[in-house]
Amino acid sequence: MSFATASKKQEDVKQGGSAYINGSGIYPVTILAPVVSVGQKGAQTVDLYVEHQGQKQICYGNLRVTNNDGSPNKIGAKIFNQLLIIADVDSVADPVAEELPIGKKDSKGNSAMKEVDILEDLCDLEVLMRIQMEYDIYNGNIQEKKNIKSFFRPDRATAEEIVNGTEPGPGYEREQKYVNNVTFKDGLTEEAIAQWIRDKRPKGTGGGGSSSAPEKAPSFGTKGKRFGKKTDDE
């Protein structure tokens, strides 16, 4: 008899848990493609298709760079500007059309290709990204958001430290006191969300709730070929 037998299978020796981003924290990610979407009233938002520890995933919404009237969104535009400084990019070209595997999943869990508009100047960029989870209610359902709060260079430099030529790190350390923050809205509580997650995020558990306008893809740019099928010009 043996109490246990050692396994050398990769899935059994891999360190850590899931690489999927599902909690507040600071994550080392590669931004594979920033995706631009436009709300029904004209506000522009940048979502990030990222890779974290080999897991590719899309972080939707809440990095709103313009308001409905086209003016810069005070919070979102500032965070997006951090990303430009960290990327050492002075100007970003207009988005181009691309296909990403972020559409509806099939029975095997594979995501369909979806045409979106991406910012090529910010693709394949390694950063540290701070996420703060937020839970609210939309059309009677609890929804989970990954709010992007800040970016850092891989050496932990902030945009301010880069511009001022100061030593990287102090800004990163100051932000540690916020790193585990979670936002609960519409009467939701930590206990209610914990139960919702244990129940595998069922629909129809959020009461009356609130609503917001869905977003749609903008129409501008030319079609690229970074992630999807070949273009007609090839």
Image (tube, rainbow, N blue to C red):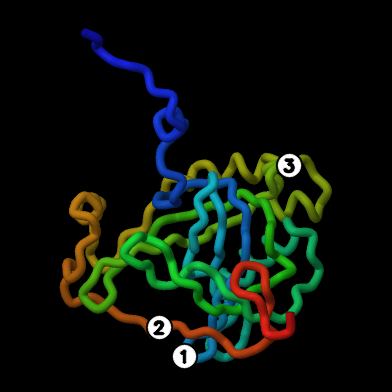
For marks 1 and 3 on the same chain, the one whose residue lies earlier in the sequence: 1
Q: Nearer the viewer, mark 1 or mark 3?
A: 1
Q: Element type at marker 2?
A: loop
- Residue 2 in the figure: left or right of residue 70: left
Q: Residue 117 lies in what quarter of the image? A: bottom right
Using the image as rendered, state which of residue 113 and residue 117 is in the foreground: 113
Q: Contact, CB < 8 Å: mark 1 with mark 2?
A: yes
Q: Element type at marker 1?
A: loop
Using the image as rendered, state which of residue 112 and residue 47 is in the foreground: 112
Name the residue tied to disc 2. Answer: 214
Residue farthest top in this picture: 1
- Residue 127 in the figure: left or right of residue 116: right
The amino acid pointed to by label 3 is Pro
Q: Residue at x 61, y 67 (%)?
A: 227
Report x, y in % for residue 8: 44, 24
Q: CA distance from mark 1 to mark 3?
A: 40 Å
Report x, y in % for residue 118: 63, 74
Q: Residue at x 42, y 35 (%)?
A: 11
Q: Which mark is residue 168?
A: 3
The amino acid pointed to by label 2 is Pro
Q: Residue at x 81, y 52 (%)?
A: 164
Quadrant of the image for the N terminus? Answer: top left
Mark 2: few, some, or many residues within 10 Å (few <14, many ≥20)?
A: few
The amino acid pointed to by label 1 is Gln
Report x, y in % for residue 175: 56, 46
Q: Which mark is residue 40?
A: 1
- Is 180 located above or below residue 106 in the figure? above
